[in-house]
Image (cartoon, rainbow, N blue to C red):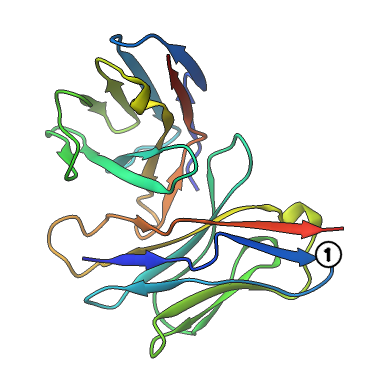
Amino acid sequence: AQSVAQPEDQVNVAEGNPLTVKCTYSVSGNPYLFWYVQYPNRGLQFLLKYITGDNLVKGSYGFEAEFNKSQTSFHLKKPSALVSDSALYFCAVRDPTIIQGAQKLVFGQGTRLTINP
Amino acid sequence: SAVISQKPSRDICQRGTSLTIQCQVDSQVTMMFWYRQQPGQSLTLIATANQGSEATYESGFVIDKFPISRPNLTFSTLTVSNMSPEDSSIYLCSVDHDRSRDTQYFGPGTRLTVL
């Protein structure tokens, strides 16, 4: 079964510094990988995804993520953090090769990102 | 992406009662999903709802507790039955957008508190 790990419950970064939110995954096939962001009292917003192709994917709000198959990782990055980036970030995976429940998204535990002014 | 709305946005309910949550999408979609996010936790899939067929429930979730309807391609409901305080969660619906089938888009969620 597929699984996702976000090893850090919380990440604190000073405004203007680069940020990284870590994610590792486990699937039997080739993964579809996603990052979502959740602001207080709001639903999940899609940020970016890796399906195939270039390992570096770019998404909304200046975020990007790098797929590393050998390390089974999909870390979220941004070169210069903004205070408005403070939110809860979720990594998710799905395995499109499984017959039953191929559309199922499995989420990590979430990482609370705080950007300090 | 699809525009998804949920009703109610939040509710406070008494133990033993039931609440029905509605999810409306602005376009026709094949698959809709219901997730639960318990306080301070991640999201867990409750069930997948396809139009014209029974919902498919994940391990640990049963139809008697979480009956789901999917009467057409733009609408679904989730009922939380015989509620207990342990059901206090955010309930989110999502859709597998037909033009971008690999990405799920989420509604704003329903925050449920059971006293």
Say which quadrant the C terminus of chain B sits in: top left
Q: Which quadrant would residue A82 be assigned to in this image? A: bottom right
Out of A13 and B4, give the one closest to the viewer.
A13
Q: Which amino acid, mark 1? A: Glu
Residue B9, image x and y in percent?
Answer: 52, 22
SS at badge 1: loop
**What residue lies at 40% left-to-right and 46% top-to-bottom?**
B43
| B28 over A45 or under it: above or below | above
- Judge left or right: residue A40 versus residue B41: right
Residue A114, image x and y in percent?
Answer: 71, 56
Identify the residue position indicated by label 1 in the image.
A15
Out of A40 and B51, give the one closest to the viewer.
A40
Out of B97 and A71, give the one closest to the viewer.
A71
Q: Which quadrant would residue B84 be assigned to in this image? A: top left
| A108 over B16 or under it: above or below | below
| A73 over B45 or under it: above or below | below
